[in-house]
Amino acid sequence: MSPKTSDARTKSNYSLAILWLASVVVGLVGYVLMTSSNSGQAELYTKQTGDYAKLFPLQSGSSLGATLIGIGVLGLLIALATHAVSFAIARSAATTTVVSETDVADIADTDADTVIAAPTATAPAVAFTAPQTTAPATASATASAAETTPVEAPAVNADETPSAPVEGDTKA
C-alpha cells in the first residue's frame, strides 16, 4: 500500500479564508456607506437647506460607515495574526522528527546500564515533650503538677524503613 499523498484541498484553511474575505467585505461596505453619506451631507450643505430629515440619517450613515471600516481593519488584523500562528504551527509540525521503533530499542539498550537509585528517606530523631497544663491555684494541685515529668516519645531509628512508601521507591 503506497503512502497517501495530500492534495491542496486538505492544506487549505477555509475558516481563515472566510475571515479574510469577510473582513475585506465589511471594510469595503463601510467605506462605501461612509463616502456616500459624506457626499450627501456635502450636497445638503452646499444647497444651504435646513432639511434635518435628510441630514440626520446621513450623519448616522457616516458614523456607521466609519465603524464598519474599523471592524474590517480589526478583522484583517485578527486574520493576519491567526494566519501567522497557523503558519508557525504548520512549520513546527513539519520539522518534528519521527522516532522509529528501532530508535526506541537502541535508546532503551543504551540506558539499561544506567540505574538511578531511588532516594532513601531517613527521619531525624525527634523528642516529643507533652505540653504542661496549669492547674488551679490550690496547694495540692501545685504539688501534683510539680511531680509530673514530661513524656518523651521513642526516638526514630535512622536504620528503620519508613512505614509509608516513599515516592520513587520500587519496592512493593
Image: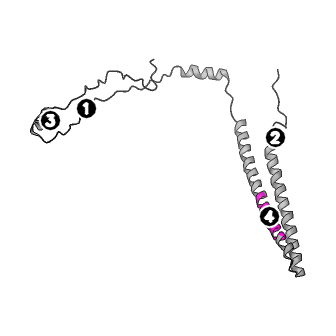
Does label 3 or label 2 sit earlier along the sequence? 2
Q: Where's residue 172, x and y in %?
A: 45, 17
* Residue designated by label 4: 64
Badge 3 element: helix
Q: Residues within 10 Å of mark 2 (few under 14, many from 20)?
A: few
Which numbered disc, 3 or 1, marks the residue closer to the eye? 3
Q: Are marks 1 and 4 in contact (CB under 8 Å)?
A: no
Does label 2 or label 1 sit earlier along the sequence? 2
Badge 4 element: helix
Image point 12% across, 33% down: which residue?
A: 144
* Residue designated by label 2: 12
Badge 1 element: loop
Amino acid type of the residue tagged 1 in the rendering: Phe
Query: Which segment is the magenta one?
Result: 57-71
Task: Tell me: residue 27, above or below residue 45.
Answer: above
The picture quadrant where one finds residue 151 is top left
The label shown at residue 128 is 1
Give the Cα separation between the discs numbered 3 and 1: 19 Å
Check residue 65 for magenta coloring.
yes
Image point 26% across, 26% down: which residue?
A: 155
List the single residue furthest toward the bottom: 48
Which numbered disc, 2 or 1, marks the residue closer to the eye? 1
Give the Cα separation between the discs numbered 1 and 4: 78 Å
Check residue 48 for magenta coloring.
no
Decide if residue 13 is on the left or right side of residue 142.
Answer: right
Give the Cα separation between the discs numbered 2 and 1: 71 Å
Q: Which of the pair 63/105 is nearer the observer? A: 63
